[in-house]
Image: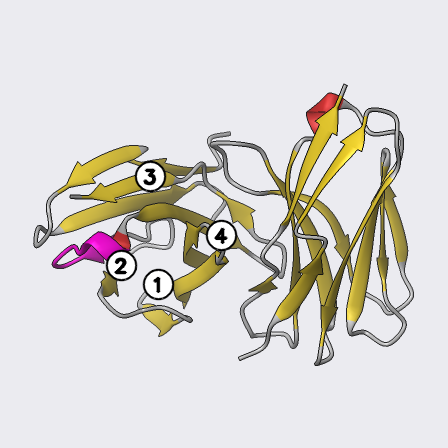
Amino acid sequence: GQQLNQSPQSMFIQEGEDVSMNCTSSSIFNTWLWYKQDPGEGPVLLIALYKAGELTSNGRLTAQFGITRKDSFLNISASIPSDVGIYFCAGQASGNTPLVFGKGTRLSVIA
Amino acid sequence: DAGITQSPRYKITETGRQVTLMCHQTWSHSYMFWYRQDLGHGLRLIYYSAAADITDKGEVPDGYVVSRSKTENFPLTLESATRSQTSVYFCASSQHVEQYFGPGTRLTVT
């Protein structure tokens, strides 16, 4: 089946630093989503991207839908302790197919 | 606005027992999903449903049974629980592509 390669798997950063993570696929997706999961809770939708090249922001978060439609990127600016968690990318190949999820990037922020 | 809820939040059961995890959503979303989350595997789709009385297998359906007689409910049953089914289970719902997740059920099979 389709797979999403999400990197890095984990990262430790200092508070105030910017963060970048990405998700790649060998096949084309029509929609990319980014979720965040806090410990002990379900994933929460952060950003949704619907068109190749689209750049969308949500506060300090910015995500981009890659031009090739095979990748997506998430940036977090000026990280704060509450950014700690697992970030998942997810893609949908076509209208009626289920989402495919990456394995997540675990973010730790050192104060 | 309750959104999507799961019950129980925690469950310990013995190998061979039947256990049902409940999922309820108040948005009248057409689609509902069941995932399991294990270290190293991320979120894996077990079953999903496009509408009442319509269900489809996901990536890891073996050992699980679902039903959807009402739009708002999507129970997941483990007919004979095994230790390999120890996991955190998430239910999600969607009307379009964006899925909204419940808080999860942590299931331990001893």
How far, Cα to Cα, is label 4 from label 2? 15 Å
Q: Earlier in the sequence, mark 1 or mark 3?
A: 1
Residues drawn in magenta = B76-84
How far, Cα to Cα, is label 2 from label 1? 5 Å
SS class of the residue under badge 3?
strand
Q: Earlier in the sequence, mark 2 or mark 3?
A: 2
Q: Nearer the viewer, residue A32 or B49?
A: A32
SS class of the residue under badge 1?
loop
The quadrant of the rendering that contains the C terminus of chain B is top left
Q: Mark 2 vs mark 3: give the one in front.
A: 3
Q: Is residue A101 placed above or below A12 in the rendered structure?
A: below
Image coords of residue A65 (percent x, y): 84, 63
Q: Which residue type carries mark 3?
A: Arg
Q: In percent of the image, x 58 and y 65: which residue is there?
A: A99
SS class of the residue under badge 4?
strand
Residue that carries the numbered disc 1 in the rendered image: B52
Residue that carries the numbered disc 3 in the rendered image: B106
Residue A27 counted in the magenta span: no
Image coords of residue A10 (percent x, y): 67, 46
Same chain, marks 4 and 3?
A: yes
Q: Earlier in the sequence, mark 4 or mark 2?
A: 2
Q: Is residue B64 left or right of residue B25?
A: left
Q: Are marks 4 and 2 in contact (CB under 8 Å)?
A: no
Within-10-Å neighbours for mark 4: few <14, some 14–19, many 20+: many
Q: Are marks 2 and 1 in contact (CB under 8 Å)?
A: yes
The chain that hosts pointer 1 is B
Within-10-Å neighbours for mark 3: few <14, some 14–19, many 20+: some
Same chain, marks 4 and 1?
A: yes
Q: Earlier in the sequence, mark 2 or mark 1?
A: 1
Residue that carries the numbered disc 4 in the rendered image: B93
How far, Cα to Cα, is label 4 from label 3? 19 Å
The chain that hosts pointer 4 is B
